[in-house]
Amino acid sequence: MSIEINWICNDVQLAQHCEHWNTLAFIALDTEFIRVDTFYPIAGLLQVSDGESTYLIDPLLIQEWQPLADVLSNAQVVKVLHACGEDLEVLALLTGAVPQPLFDTQVAAGYLNLGFSMGYSRLVQQLLDVELPKGETRSDWLQRPLSDLQVLYAAQDTAYLVDVYQVLMQQLSAQKLAWVLEDGALSVASYLDTSDPYELWRSVKLAWKLSPKQLAVLRELSAWRELQARERDVPRNRIVRESTLWALASELPSEMADLAPLDDMHPRIMRQEGATLLKIIKRARALPEAQWPDALPEPLPIEASKVLKRLRKVGLELGLELDIAPELMLRKKILEELLRSGYPDGPYQLPESLQGWRRELMGAALLESLEGVQ
């Protein structure tokens, strides 16, 4: 396959090409970045293919990203990406926008029952019978000039992504295409929802063991760590480890001498952040009860595994009927939320996380399968 590669190295070129991309039915996108010792990914290259040419955008030379933001937000232009979780972050950081509507080829492959969480190279091999080179995945994308191998690797990513998209589109029914785009919108919404630092405490391991008062402390500590990591642009664990946050919320220390015995309390953290941590704990402990979070539910007992299996069967049977990868049907987290809503005696309520076509096609069947559960 001969790939026509065009470099975009200034704001004028980007604006001109974005004007054209805004007239298209779709564009394929990918990003190359480095994220080793930073909180935020550092973009090294953006790739765009429009079905005719492939464009390599040098983010080190671009200042004005609004034209690309307009393309990303253009509801008439489908944005095609593969396994795009980190790409969303890179694009949002550069442009302030996220790709909508979003067609994720990995998700689409699942809807065609080609495989679940299939890597890009494997999908290209399966659909196009092309073997892509893999050696440049972890290379230095901030170096200039980029090597010929890096340029070829980056260009091939989106050039073949166009072909993958077109093959998938030929096989997808109108209904499944709508579901792929619906899942793309959910991915974007999920990414945007994770931005609130005061909600991160919910995902701390073993947080369910803490009382509401302790959770109030954990919430403030987790938010502080997140905001500091963003401000300093360093990984979260460089500020304080998550296990240390839990220990601080559990023990509620009030003096510097109380910090040293805590699990995972590194001497450097105690020396640099100890006073600040104690101030946050003191302030959080003084919050009125009305501002405490609700206690988190305990993990489901082992006996509930049989009921989860019954719920999962609803998705598996429908997936078989629709020829969709079973892993795409119902996430375990959703099933656990449903079960917690009334276990063990009921009544049960469908969780808000069960949305769209899954709620429409499986909601009633899930509730019906819980009737008579003891």
Image: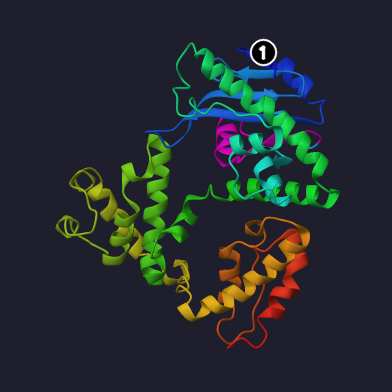
Q: Secondary structure at mark 1?
A: strand
Q: Nearer the viewer, residue 177 or 355?
A: 177
Q: Quick one: label 1, few (<14), some, or many (20+) residues within 10 Å?
A: some
Q: As shown in the figure, which amino acid type bears the numbered disc 1?
A: Asn
Asked whether residue 283 appears in the rendered view, the answer is: yes
Horizontally, residue 354 falls left or right of residue 303, namely right
Horizontally, residue 97 falls left or right of residue 199, namely right
Residue 186 horizontal/vertical position (percent): 67, 51
Quadrant position of the N terminus in the picture: top right
From the image, tell me which residue sits under label 1: 6
Horizontally, residue 353 falls left or right of residue 243, namely right
Q: Which residues are magenta?
A: 76-96
Q: Nearer the viewer, residue 166 or 84?
A: 166
Query: In this rendering, is residue 147 above or below 76?
Result: above
Residue 206 horizontal/vertical position (percent): 38, 65
Determine which quarter of the picture holds residue 123.
Answer: top right
Determine which quarter of the picture holds residue 5.
Answer: top right
Q: Residue at x 41, y 69 (%)?
A: 208
Determine which quarter of the picture holds residue 286.
Answer: bottom left
